[in-house]
Image (cartoon, grey):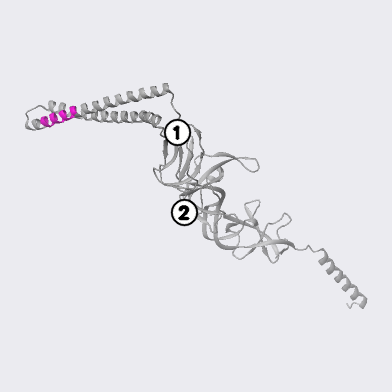
Amino acid sequence: MVLSKTQRIAALSVAMAALILFFVFRPSPLPVDSGVVRRGPLQVTLEGEGVTRVNDRFVIAAPVSGKLVRVELEEGDRVRKGSVVASLLPPQLDSREFREASARSEAARAALDEAIARQSRAALTLALAERRFGRYRNLYGEGAVSKEAYELAENEAQTLRKEVQGARSGAEAARYNFGALQAIIDRQVAGKPVTVLSPVDGRVLRIHEQSERFVSAGSPLVDIGDPSAIEIVIDVLSSDAIRVKPGNRVVIQDWGGDRELKGVVKTVGPAAFTKTSALGIEEKRVNIVAVLSRDEPLLGDNFRVQASIVLREASDVLQVPVSSLFRGKEGWHLFVIEDGRAIDKPVTVGMRGALQAQVLAGVRMGQRVVVHPTNELKDGMPVQVQE
């Protein structure tokens, strides 16, 4: 059948109109961001803020109540073991207190003399018993005395040895007691201050009291330690702390230097404490203590740092951006871009880091996936990757 010219024009017009309607009403591709499935190293880390502290910190306290002489040391000064870090003037005794202290001192002197005499008597008695035991041992070997007599002499010598040890300890205790009481009298008479000595070599970390003032016994005066022996205290949520083990690697960042510092977890706190967050929420947190692999001289005591605790890591795994994953009816899903369309794919996820996640099955290397998929995106929908 041959169409007339008018029919051909009409058919062409209908076809053109249908084509125009198709392009007008065809859904436009949804613009999306994309990432690439790739292989590479992956770390699962736990981020936390921490502070530095000296490993062995010694808080030097006032041994007696009295007037503190102005501390001449400055924070950061080096001190040697046995050097004077502070001095205290004990309060002056009145006449009655002085007489009582003198009497206690004389009583302690008499007790010391008695203890020394007791020690001398015990030593003399032991010497006689030792000679007697030596004779009985020889006679027993010759059969001249009975075994019972030999054992009695041996037991007597052993008992006296213990008595000599007890007498020696008693004399030593009496000597220390007399020295402590006599020191009160000597300081009262000569006005000598009580000196506080450094127990170790180190540096002054903090001076609690520097000016002259009356302090009570036990009041902290000076903190001393070695600032080169630094450890990091990181507090994390208790629910995260159970994943941390001693020996986990730690990366220290944002501490002020131009490089990252390395360390390992030393201990995980055995108990949690309550801390209020910036939002006013009470949280249970646990202290993680890490030590640096090498000393960093620029770090001091109580410096703030940002730490990443490496929980798990692998050198070469297939991975996708974490932002491409979403929960489906059965596990994890993502959208793979194929021929300009987003195809919904179920995937099996392994380790999950901060930015990347391991994929065990469902995608292959080099495929492009949609990141940050919106609720509008459906399976099979055309998409346009934004540059």
Q: Is residue 184 left or right of residue 365?
A: left
Residue 342's place in the image compared with 269, above or below, is below
Image coordinates for residue 111, horizontal then vertical, percent: 30, 24
User: What's the mark number on residue 295?
Assistant: 2
**To which quarter of the image does residue 162 belong?**
top left
Image coordinates for residue 292, horizontal then vertical, percent: 48, 52
Is tag 2's residue or tag 1's residue first in the polypeptide sequence?
Answer: 1
Which residue position holds label 1?
A: 89
Instruction: Identify the element where label 1 is drawn.
Output: strand
Q: Which residues are magenta?
A: 124-136
Task: Report if residue 159 is visible in the image.
Answer: no
The residue carrying pointer 1 sits among few (fewer than 14), some (14 to 19) or many (20 or more) residues within 10 Å by Cα, namely some
* Residue ID at (22%, 30%): 161
Instruction: Identify the element where label 2 is drawn.
Output: loop
**To which quarter of the image does residue 63 belong?**
top left
User: What's the mark number on residue 220?
Assistant: none
Q: Nearer the viewer, residue 49 or 189?
A: 189
Give the farthest residue toward the right: 6
Give the farthest residue toward the front: 190
Q: Nearer the viewer, mark 2 or mark 1?
A: 1
Q: Is residue 166 left or right of residue 222?
A: left
